[in-house]
Amino acid sequence: MARVLSCIQPTGPVHLGNYLGALANWVSGQSKNDVFHGIVDLHALTVTDKPGVIGDQTLQLAAVLFAVGLDPKVATVFVQSHIPAHSQLGWIMECTVSYGELSRMTQFKDKQSKREADFVSAGLFTYPALQAADILLYDAEEVPVGDDQKQHIEITRDIAMRFNHRFGETFVIPKAVTPPVGARVMDLQSPTSKMSKSTESDAGCVYLLDSPDAIVKKFKRAVTDSDNEVIYDREKKPGVSNLLDILSAATGTTQQALADQYSQYGKLKSDCGDAVVAILQPIQAKYADLMADPAQLNEMLSDGAQRAETIAEKTLQRAHQAIGMTPRR
């Protein structure tokens, strides 16, 4: 059984693409490996500058993770800032990675270019060092990531190997693995773009906590084309194919089999909205129960933090000993 780490930032509401594309796989895979799921609130500081926001969003995200089906007795779910070893090892990682390596990270360049008129924190630049600490603290063997995150795993591997070369074998060298294929969910108003909470309009983004009426309305207004022919073809008919992808993920029926059942877009949109409502309502009910009992939610996070901290502290002490730092007496 491999040790697997996946993390998520508490930077806003979770949408349907997050759930069908990733979180559903977290749930189905939690009994197959020794899984750790971190809510990385320290990373969220690179995009948050208002008091109280991160704390509220962290609890809301935790409730969502448990509501979708993560079992706190099986999966170790923790909040990054609850474990001081993240920040402590993060500094050691900053001292092990070079300025040149950080400056070549494409995600930093992309995010910096989008915020030219805004404040760009140094934390955004050194983000990969803290991310390396997140991974290495738990002796993670596998880190499921998409193509856009593989560079971050490569730099983590480079940092770990450099540290091991300097100070002796200390860290497990993780490897990036391709996660199980989840549903590819695109924006309902711009079906050639991934569903995202960062778009200018919410019209094409379905959030897990949207009301049934709002969900149905968004699907009824989904962009398709003028042909009114239901065919699964992502290149030629991206809007229709997106609806078939979502309905397939919600019902377990293949896209082609679904396409054969419809002759009009209106019925497809209506059924798609109803199917999404059906899978989200139990999640919303569980979420409401958890948010109504913050003591229970915090206890679940505390249990996860205790399990995570036990491992993280051992790894941090191993790193300190390898360096030869003076131990506290």
Image (cartoon, helix red, strand yellow):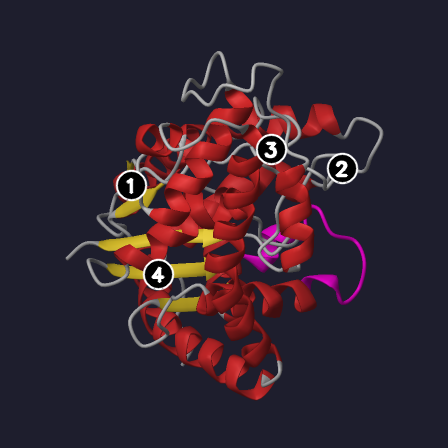
Quadrant assignment, res 199: top right
Q: Residue at x 35, y 71 (%)?
A: 71
Q: Which mark is residue 51?
A: none
What residue is pinned by disc 4?
A: 36
Q: Residue at x 68, y 46 (%)?
A: 217
Asked if marks 4 and 1 touch (Cβ < 8 Å), the reply is: no
Residue density around tag 4, few if under 14, some if 14–19, many if 20 or more, within 10 Å: many
Residue type at mark 2: give it.
Ser
Q: Is residue 42 magenta?
A: yes
Q: Residue at x 50, y 74 (%)?
A: 286
What residue is pinned by disc 1?
A: 180
Q: Is residue 90 above or below residue 74?
A: above
Locate residue 276, reporting x and y percent: 51, 51
Q: Which mark is residue 187?
A: 3
- Marks 2 and 1 sit apart, C-alpha to C-alpha, by 30 Å
Quadrant assignment, res 107: top right
Asked if marks 2 and 4 touch (Cβ < 8 Å), the reply is: no
Q: Residue at x 34, y 50 (%)?
A: 25
What residue is pinned by disc 2?
A: 201
